Image (spheres, rainbow, N blue to C red):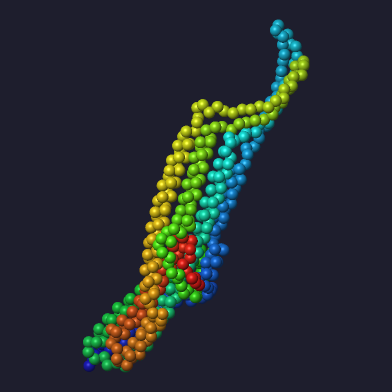
Amino acid sequence: MKQNVLKFSFLATAYVAATVVIMQAADAVSAVTNSPVITNQVLLDDLVNEALEKNPELNFYRAEIAAARGGRKSAGAWANPEVSAEIGQKRVKDSSGALLGEGAAWAVSVNQTFEYPGRLSLRKAIANRDIQLAGLGFAQFKLTLAARVRSLGYNIFIAQEKLAAAREVADRFQALTEVLVQRDPAGITPVLETRIIEASTITLQRQASEATIAAQSALLELNQLRGQPPGVVVSVTGAQLNFRASPSLGTLLDTARTNAFELRIRQTELEQQGFKVSLAKNERFSGVTVGPFISEAKAGDTERTIGLGVSLPLPLWNRNVGNIEIAKAREQQAQTSLLLTQREVERRVTENSLALQTKLAEMARWQADAPQNFREAAELADRHYRLGAVPIATYVELQKQYLEAIDAMLATKQDALLAAQNLESLTGESLLINQQ
């Protein structure tokens, strides 16, 4: 009898300790979304809009576009004219060496260099492609930023949902202690039940810790992307995702070949490199320098000359062969890069399309009220365990499966969101009906 009492005391103590650990783990997760620091309840779309407005890195891409436009102005500008002046002394002597006259001599000329025909247009075309590349980079960054912010916001929402489930289980374990005190502690059962509750406690504590770390990491990165201080805490609401039916793989591939930012960037680079090859060939011929001049010399008589000068180098030794070969090699590299990028885009579209279809098919098999059914089953097990109709193994397993089912459903939606956003970045088509 004394041994049974000791076992009963040990069991009650273990349950109390387990309850304390679970409550502490739930409180740790709660700190993510219930911090005394500034807490805001926001929608996913509100987070995205804020990031697109306040993200500091956007200024980098805006400056890149401004720099490209500045380069366009420089490429279309003519070379400045050059003014040259000469001054000296002139002496005139006859054949015997006698000085006939002496006076000042000077000359002034204004020269303007004109590029070889077509060269200025080629430089403008190259500069225009720089503007296009900067614009594509800006648009790609905004789309990537929106997808990342949406994913981080949904990660915080997942942490909130896990927190709610952890609190439910923690409350049940706390109430379970009161029930165990009223039970007959006879036999080996109390010892085995103690081991079950200890193992369940360790699992629950790990789940809560992982949720805490994930939510904290997501929140820090989210604040950074939104241009907010690290201490600002947000609570994400209304993050129920609804997906469109995924188009066929052939449709997605055709759309990606036209809209994928990586392909559009590589195509623009290839076009630009083609202009650079043409420019290198054009530069085999030098520009022409033309300008009026006037000179005057006074040595007894006044001698004045007015005319038009023309000068150009003869392309005898340097035919720009080296630069032409370099430009052609870069063009070949650009062609190869475009081909490889196209294959990579096709692979990623196929991979994400299959992943999305798999996740959507998995979600379609769920019952609409599945989370509520799991919650009710856990509550039902709790009530019947108090009456002695359900063994401890069944009770603990139901609580565990309830948490794992919630986690699995949220993870599946998260995977579907990731695949949908990857397809959006590749095709430009959103597969989310309601992103709030």
Q: 250 or 59, which lies in front?
A: 250
| Residue depicted at 50% across the width and 31% down the height | 319
Q: Is any part of residue 18 visible from this angle?
A: no
Residue 375 at x, y = what percent?
39, 83
| Residue 119 pos. (x, y %) | 57, 38
Give the answer, above or below, for where 267 lies relative to 294: below
Residue 300 visible in the displayed image:
yes
Q: How many marks overall?
A: 0
Q: Position of residue 310 (x, y in %)?
A: 64, 27
Q: Is residue 265 left or right of residue 93?
A: left
Q: Is residue 322 left or right of residue 385?
A: right
Q: Is residue 424 above or below residue 189?
A: above
Tell me the residue at 43%/40% (across/down): 329
**Which quarter of the rendering shows the N terminus?**
bottom left
Residue lying at 31% horizontally and 79% vertically, measured from the top left: 200
Given the current orientation, which residue lies at the most extreme top position? 96
Q: Looking at the picture, how far across and down is residue 190, in whole percent?
A: 26, 87
Q: Is residue 410 above or below residue 111?
A: below
Q: Which residue lies at the image location 52% right of the left edge and 60% below the top edge?
A: 142
Kindly indicate the quadrant of the structure image that contains residue 194: bottom left
